[in-house]
Image (cartoon, rainbow, N blue to C red):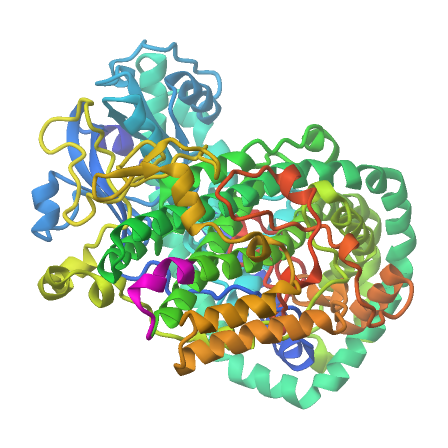
């Protein structure tokens, strides 16, 4: 292997690599130094002018994966060094970086892994034929036949292959199809997480970086959303260099490669991997240097912005109006001819699979809580509850259980986009939707944890099932509202990613030559914070945003989409819940576990805690030498409806009488269990009813409402919900203002857009119950399709409110799917 790389990467080739890397980084550095002051100005302006907006109803966990592991087990791995298959132990920590060891004992001893795999930019495949098809794209003109090389003769018939356009490919296999499906889900989850690499916390560096990359590619006539915008900044910049460097290296090196077709392809990938590593090292050092330089100038820039904020804003608005006069007529003409006829059809194609995915998230969450209620009813102890909550607490990061949700979105198809709007792939949209689904699941689980923990203070074990049911109902209502808000925002951003690159590509040739004359309108002191190129893109963005927002609003009133109307936003429905937002993480095992768990748990065991069970299957063959053995402490975690004794079948309904296995080995007719834990019709019915005050009195008389401060807070929150529903509903903040930070358009422009969209100022008018088309469905345990849920209208009493959402976060954390606008990211 080393001989192949050294033979083809001689000194002249290495000098060429360094020269091309330096050229790309030189252009990028110049753009970054220009975009950094703009991003800083946009951040400071947004902080001063943002009026807030609807806030998420669900709480958000600060550190979802701290000191947790995701998965571990054994796989056969193909080793390039000796061209043999070896059994290796794989361990995936909270970073989602795949570590592999000689065996499980080496991991338990704390030895360094034999190797690591950063999954950013990879694709996972389960077929050798599909892998060979992709392999042909890396070295055009060389085609290998399946089975023509010993390297593709897997040790078993169930391969797992990782493909990357530049990095080394990875080959694994397992002994059963069941294992293969589970490991595919694990690797897909790692890829999804690593592709979401840029931090949302970096409000200046992230938009400056993404804008610089985008402008660099546009300067080279590449406007489409880039699939390789994934991983760390060093990986993204390396992808940027490799995009131009690989074609230059491939032709002379390919002509000198010897051997069979597959051998040539594999040798080329080894060479490409070596080049990729070299480029990452070089761009990493240069990127760190430019970041440090810009950060050192930040105090002076901030002082200038604070001093001249009003003048900078006034100057920018003046230039924006002048550029708008030039650009708007051309943009409107392009919109009417080439974009407006396709907005609704593309939106429809986006909405159907995405909504199915979010509905599946709701169902998975509901089934897990029903299972916990049944087990609690049977066990009747807080110790058993601690064990179950440890399992549920990391549900969002269970690759196998979440796979059914992710698969719904993978059916997204946008036919014709590649030809008409230069969209090469829908993978960026699919991955972004899946990440949002995982976030919503984790928010729902975390909110349930906090509500349940607060409610259990002072509660007796006999009330545990009813307490779980009340918390479950509250969380599902909040999830329904939040999922609607998140989906609508995703639809708007996805449409922007599709249309904006196309519009810029069409308008740039005629507009760019005229932009330099507008620089004379900008004072020299303000020229660092106002760039005419960015303003041009903001004007283009503004021209299409009104049509996109109108399309999403019209879709929200259709029953089948299961969305809330944009004009319905309640406030202060559950104020006491916000008090739990900053609560410390709950250690269910130590607080409610059995005495042995509380006394035997060491810090090292906690750090190695497994939150997802392994892939061992009863009655199936496993790999030799500890293959698929579970980490201690996780043998009770079931993965699917048929795995584990305590799992509830997905198809179980409230009226079925078949026996349901319980945790103690006994069984009970399923119908009777459902009746025992199912809420009354008044409890499941959306919104408040006349019977609810009587139910509250009955609960008090039965001793279900204790006099502790926590219980009083909960009851106070419930009463405030009823009071909020009985009063007037508040209309939402304008949608244009919601995207202020995402697209970096001035608040004045957004307010003007809001007037154009709405047609008149919004007034406080109660929304009739019949127009609220977002149904929560019942909580009886039966499965609901998106259409069934959307077909049931609900009263305003079910809707919860928003108050402080920091809008415009957009896709800044998922740069692989983001189209960053001037000074911000979508």
How many numbered circles are shown? 0
Image side of residue 715 versus residue 78, left or right: right
At horizontal 74% and vertical 50% (from top left) the residue drawn is 556
- Among the 4 quarters of the image, the one containing residue 585: bottom left
- Give the x, y percent position of residue 252: 43, 26
Front-lying residue, 369 or 511: 369
Instruction: Specify whether residue 464 is painted magenta.
Output: yes
As drawn, the residue found furthest toward the bottom would be 307
Give the dominant element type of the magenta stretch: helix, strand or loop.
helix
Quadrant for the C terminus in the image: bottom right
Front-lying residue, 727 or 286: 727
Front-lying residue, 805 or 677: 677
Front-lying residue, 771 or 639: 771
Magenta segment range?
A: 458-468
| Residue 13 visible somewhere in the drawing | no
Image side of residue 512 versus residue 675, left or right: right
- Among the 4 quarters of the image, the one containing residue 583: bottom left
At horizontal 48% and vertical 79% (from top left) the residue drawn is 713
At horizontal 24% and vertical 25% (from top left) the residue drawn is 174
Image side of residue 10 versus residue 44, left or right: left
Instruction: Specify whether residue 338 is painted magenta.
Output: no
| Residue 399 visible somewhere in the drawing | yes
- Give the x, y percent position of residue 325: 91, 62
- Give the x, y percent position of residue 598: 14, 65
């Amino acid at each position: 292997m080393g001989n192949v790389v050294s033979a083809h990467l001689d000194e002249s080739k290495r000098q060429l690599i360094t020269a091309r890397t330096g050229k790309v980084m030189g252009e990028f550095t110049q753009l970054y130094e220009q975009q950094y002051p703009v991003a800083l100005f946009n951040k400071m302006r947004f902080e001063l002018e943002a009026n807030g907006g609807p806030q998420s109803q669900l709480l958000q966990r600060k550190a979802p994966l701290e000191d947790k592991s995701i998965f571990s087990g054994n796989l056969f791995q193909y080793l390039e060094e000796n061209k043999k298959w070896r059994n290796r132990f794989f361990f995936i920590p909270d970073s989602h970086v795949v570590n592999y060891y000689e065996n499980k004992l080496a991991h338990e001893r704390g030895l360094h892994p034999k190797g690591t795999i950063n999954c950013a930019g990879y694709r996972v495949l389960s077929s050798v034929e599909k892998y060979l098809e992709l392999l042909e794209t890396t070295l055009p003109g060389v085609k290998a036949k399946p089975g023509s090389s010993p390297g593709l003769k897997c040790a078993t018939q169930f391969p797992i292959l990782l493909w990357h356009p530049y990095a080394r490919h990875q080959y694994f296999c397992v002994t059963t199809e069941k294992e293969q499906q589970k490991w595919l889900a694990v690797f897909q989850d790692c890829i999804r997480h690593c592709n979401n690499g840029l931090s949302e916390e970096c409000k200046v560096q992230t938009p400056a970086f993404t804008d610089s990359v985008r402008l660099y590619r546009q300067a080279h006539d590449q406007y489409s959303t880039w699939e390789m915008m994934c991983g760390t900044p060093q990986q993204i910049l390396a992808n940027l260099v490799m995009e131009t460097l690989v074609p230059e290296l491939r032709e002379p090196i390919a002509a000198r490669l010897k051997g069979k077709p597959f051998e040539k392809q594999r040798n080329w990938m080894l060479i490409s991997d070596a080049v990729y590593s070299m480029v990452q090292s070089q761009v990493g050092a240069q990127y760190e240097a430019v970041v440090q330089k810009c950060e050192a100038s930040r105090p002076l820039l901030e002082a200038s912005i604070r001093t001249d904020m009003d003048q900078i804003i006034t100057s920018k608005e003046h230039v924006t109006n002048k550029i708008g006069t030039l650009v708007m007529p051309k943009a409107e003409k392009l919109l009417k001819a080439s974009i407006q006829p396709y907005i609704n059809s593309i939106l429809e194609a986006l909405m159907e699979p995405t909504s199915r995915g979010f509905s599946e998230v709701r169902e998975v969450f509901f089934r897990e809580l029903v299972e916990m209620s049944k087990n609690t009813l049977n066990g009747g102890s807080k110790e058993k509850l601690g064990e179950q909550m440890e399992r549920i607490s990391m549900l969002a990061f269970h690759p196998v259980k979440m796979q059914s949700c992710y698969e719904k979105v993978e059916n997204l198809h946008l036919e014709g986009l590649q030809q008409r709007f230069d969209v090469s792939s829908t993978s960026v949209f699919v991955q972004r939707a899946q990440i949002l689904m995982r976030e919503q699941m984790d928010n729902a689980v975390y909110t349930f944890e906090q509500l349940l923990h607060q409610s259990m203070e002072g509660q007796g074990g006999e009330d545990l099932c009813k307490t779980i049911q009340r918390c479950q109902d509250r969380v599902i209502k909040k999830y329904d509202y939040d999922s609607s808000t998140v989906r609508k925002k995703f639809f708007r951003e996805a449409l922007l990613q599709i249309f904006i690159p196309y519009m810029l590509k069409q308008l740039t040739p005629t507009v760019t030559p005229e932009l330099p004359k507008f620089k004379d309108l900008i004072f020299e002191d303000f020229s660092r914070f106002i760039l005419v190129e960015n303003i041009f893109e903001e004007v283009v963005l503004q021209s299409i945003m009104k049509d996109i927002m109108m399309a999403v609003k019209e879709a929200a009133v259709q029953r089948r989409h299961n969305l809330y109307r944009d004009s319905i936003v309640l406030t202060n429905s559950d104020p006491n819940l916000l008090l739990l937002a900053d609560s410390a993480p709950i250690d269910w095992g130590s607080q409610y576990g059995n005495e042995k768990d509380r006394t035997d748990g060491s810090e090292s065991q906690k750090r190695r805690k497994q939150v997802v069970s392994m892939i061992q299957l009863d009655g199936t063959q496993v790999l030799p030498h500890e293959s698929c053995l579970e980490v201690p402490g996780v043998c009770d975690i079931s993965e699917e409806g048929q795995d584990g004794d305590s799992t509830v079948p997905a198809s179980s309904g409230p009226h079925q009488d078949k026996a349901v296995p319980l945790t103690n080995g006994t069984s009970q007719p399923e119908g009777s269990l459902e009746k025992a834990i199912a809420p009354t019709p008044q409890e499941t019915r959306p919104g408040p009813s006349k019977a609810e005050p009587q139910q509250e009195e009955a609960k008090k008389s039965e001793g279900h409402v204790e006099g502790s401060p926590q219980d009083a807070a909960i009851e106070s929150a419930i009463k405030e919900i009823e009071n909020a529903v009985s009063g007037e509903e508040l209309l939402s903040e304008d949608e244009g203002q919601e995207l202020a930070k995402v697209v970096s358009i001035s608040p004045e422009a957004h307010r003007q857009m809001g007037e154009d969209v709405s047609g008149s100022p919004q007034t406080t008018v109660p929304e009739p119950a019949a127009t609220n088309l977002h149904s929560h469905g019942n909580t009886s345990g039966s499965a609901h399709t998106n259409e069934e849920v959307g077909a049931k209208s609900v009263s305003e009493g079910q809707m919860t409110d928003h108050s402080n959402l920091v809008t415009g976060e957009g896709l800044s954390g998922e740069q692989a799917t983001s189209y960053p606008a001037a000074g911000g990211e979508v």
